[in-house]
């Protein structure tokens, strides 16, 4: 459609159009990379426009003016999210921040709780039917436009056309400005690639093929998604699409094929990135852009089975409270979409949420995992909502866990330099027992080499990994679930109590080289159940004593032999040459496991009822 012929009376220059803004007006400006730069410039440059309140999310262009006292005398900025370019102005009190969930903002406009006089938006040129597209900024822009008394639109041929609820007919626009310019681009700054790589390594372990993911605002979530490039058939339902996702689209890692809700469509509200990204979403029917009240609605999110939310945080306390929008008393970003997606993932069948956070800040000087949030820090996500936390030092599972368990989980993934301090602070607050031992100060990334999976009949499987201090509770459940004779064979007496003190003395600070414990576990819904434990402990520099125990219902399935193989490989890495074991003579099953694995084992009676077995790793020559 040629608007110069269809509605010539609506066409104005930028300078003429902004004259329709009356003094004292409440003006909405389109979001982020979709903002109408030329209209903003014309409004600011017109000295007759006074006493204006501007509402916006993710402001970019206005950052050029906030240092000008004359601008601040004429305009008041109220932002739903503080962008990087606006942070210094926020610190200096030059803008006002409105903390609110993104899913709620459209209804705030529709209900006139925040009344809008004028909306400044940017759209693509109309098609032959007169429909323009909001392009890469549907989010709260659609509601802002529909709620304002006057709509001024910059028609820009550079704005991509997107599918979904992005269409706006020229009849819905009061004034049109024809102006072509480059759309705002946003490049994520590269920060600590080492941290992103390690967190990405753990993210990869958590995301299964066929899952539907959400990626939150921030450089870290954007960086870690690149480590999902070996996955298959991922789906996407997210607030913002960024360049970090582009390689996954091109490799068809994200193809939305298996989504349970809106299959085949990548659902989003806005797009912020490079021109390459904008060209990719342009007129691409795979992308389905909807308003934030739809995309961020937890009930809509929950319609996606196996939904995984990935977002970041500024600070996290030992009880699981998360701060995302402030540093001390300084407002830094915003509540944004995190809570909406965390709650949606919790409602999803098979879904969960992940908070990614570097273990330290200020070049390693301070821990981001803290005993309590900083004074003035706002709680964006409550301790009741938190699920999984990932730092570069591992995965902490907090969902439904007690404060005691959370402290152990989080201290385990904190920077090694701060682990003892966190444990001591937790003791002062009575979060944990006074005699609690701190987790090892080792960097345990190497333990990932010791993960494995074993298939069982009936399509079941057992996963194996080194035991961690946070496994204390589940390991106690394991021992208490064993039959009396199994316990007798393992401990040589009928032990009735497996106390916290006993178990933490053995495993709270495992060496992982001179002594090692491997657990086998199976997944029961969202809970891991330990079904086997195998250990070795150093006797001398070449010899380690080995023992293991397996739950009775999965005996004779090769699990003991698998544990023995895992432990031997680890022991060889640490220069051990043989295992020894003490077994009750009547425990014939255990003896057969050792004999099968070590045909050259030497056996000798000790004390009548016990058998000492020496098992060299390499067969000794026979004479």
Image (spheres, grey):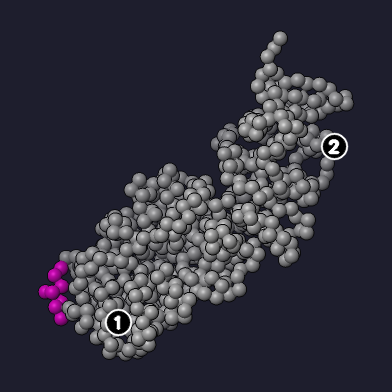
From the viewer's perspective, is the residue at label 2 or at label 1 nearer?
1
Snapshot quadrant of residue 23:
bottom left
Q: Position of residue 48 (x, y in %)?
A: 27, 89
Which residue is at the front of the view, 67 or 405?
A: 67
Left or right, 320 with reference to 310: right
Q: Position of residue 366 (x, y in %)?
A: 59, 62
Mark 2 touches mark 1? (CB < 8 Å): no
Q: Looking at the rendering, in which quadrant would you find the C terminus? A: top right
- Marks 2/1: CA distance? 84 Å
Sequence-first disc among 2 and 1:
1
Secondary structure character of the magenta stretch overall: helix
Res 435 label: none
Snapshot quadrant of residue 244:
bottom left
Q: Would you name the residue on which mark 2 appears?
A: 493
Q: Position of residue 443 (x, y in %)?
A: 61, 47
Which segment did they paint magenta? 1-9
Residue shown at the point (79%, 47%) measured from the top left = 502
Q: Is residue 123 above or below residue 509?
A: below
Residue shown at the point (85%, 37%) measured from the top left = 493
């Amino acid at each position: 459609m040629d608007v110069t012929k269809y509605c010539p009376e609506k066409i104005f220059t930028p300078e003429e159009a902004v004259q329709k803004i009356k003094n004292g007006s409440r003006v909405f400006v389109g979001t982020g990379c979709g903002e109408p730069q030329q209209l903003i410039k014309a409004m600011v440059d017109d000295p007759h426009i006074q006493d204006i309140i501007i509402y916006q999310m993710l402001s970019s262009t206005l950052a050029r003016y906030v240092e000008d006292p004359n601008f601040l005398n004429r305009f008041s900025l109220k932002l739903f999210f503080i962008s990087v370019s606006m942070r210094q102005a926020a610190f200096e009190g030059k803008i006002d921040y409105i903390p609110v969930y993104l899913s709620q903002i459209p209804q705030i406009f529709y209900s006139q709780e925040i009344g809008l006089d004028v909306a400044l938006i940017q759209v693509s040129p109309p098609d032959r039917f007169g429909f323009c597209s909001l392009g890469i900024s549907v989010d709260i822009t659609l509601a802002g436009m529909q709620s304002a008394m006057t709509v001024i639109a910059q028609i820009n041929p550079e704005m991509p056309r997107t599918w979904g609820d992005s269409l706006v007919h020229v009849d819905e626009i009061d004034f049109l400005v024809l102006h072509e310019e480059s759309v705002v681009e946003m490049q994520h700054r590269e920060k600590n690639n080492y941290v992103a790589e390690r967190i990405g390594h753990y993210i990869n372990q958590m995301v299964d093929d066929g899952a539907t993911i959400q990626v939150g605002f921030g450089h870290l979530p954007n960086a870690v998604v690149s480590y999902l490039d070996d996955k298959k058939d991922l789906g996407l339902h997210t607030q913002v699409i960024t360049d970090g996702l582009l390689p996954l689209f091109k490799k068809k890692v994200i193809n939305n094929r298996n989504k349970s809700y809106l299959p085949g469509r990548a659902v989003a509200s806005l797009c912020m990135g490079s021109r390459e990204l904008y060209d990719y979403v342009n007129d691409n029917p795979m992308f389905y852009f909807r308003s934030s009240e739809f995309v961020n609605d937890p009930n809509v999110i929950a319609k996606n089975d196996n939904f995984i939310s990935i977002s970041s945080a500024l600070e996290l306390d030992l009880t699981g409270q998360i701060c995302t929008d402030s540093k001390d008393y300084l407002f830094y970003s915003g509540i944004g979409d995190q809570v909406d997606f965390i709650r949606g993932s919790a409602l999803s069948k098979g879904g969960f949420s992940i908070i990614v956070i570097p273990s330290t800040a200020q070049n390693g000087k301070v821990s981001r995992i803290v005993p309590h949030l900083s004074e003035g820090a706002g709680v964006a996500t409550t301790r009741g909502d938190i699920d999984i936390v990932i730092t570069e030092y591992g995965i902490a599972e907090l969902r439904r866990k007690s404060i005691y368990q959370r402290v152990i989980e989080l201290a385990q993934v904190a920077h090694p330099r701060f682990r003892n301090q966190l444990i001591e602070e937790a003791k002062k607050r009575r979060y944990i027992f006074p005699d609690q031992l701190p987790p090892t100060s080792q960097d345990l990334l190497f333990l990932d080499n010791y993960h494995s999976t074993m298939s069982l009949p009936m399509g079941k499987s057992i996963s194996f990994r080194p035991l961690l201090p946070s496994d204390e509770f589940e390991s106690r459940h394991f021992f208490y679930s064993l039959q009396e004779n199994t316990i007798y064979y393992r401990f040589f007496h009928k032990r009735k109590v497996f106390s916290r003190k006993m178990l933490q003395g053995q495993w709270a600070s495992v060496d992982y080289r001179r002594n090692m414990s491997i657990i086998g576990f199976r997944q029961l819904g969202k809970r891991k159940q330990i079904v086997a434990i195998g250990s070795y402990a150093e006797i001398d520099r070449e010899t380690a004593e080995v023992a293991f125990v397996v739950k009775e219902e999965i005996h004779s399935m090769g699990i003991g032999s698998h544990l023995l193989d895992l432990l031997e490989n680890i022991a060889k890495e640490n220069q051990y040459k043989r295992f020894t074991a003490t077994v009750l003579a009547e425990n014939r099953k255990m003896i057969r496991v050792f004999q099968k694995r070590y045909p050259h084992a030497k056996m000798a009676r000790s004390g009548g009822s016990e058998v000492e077995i020496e098992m060299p790793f390499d067969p000794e020559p026979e004479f």
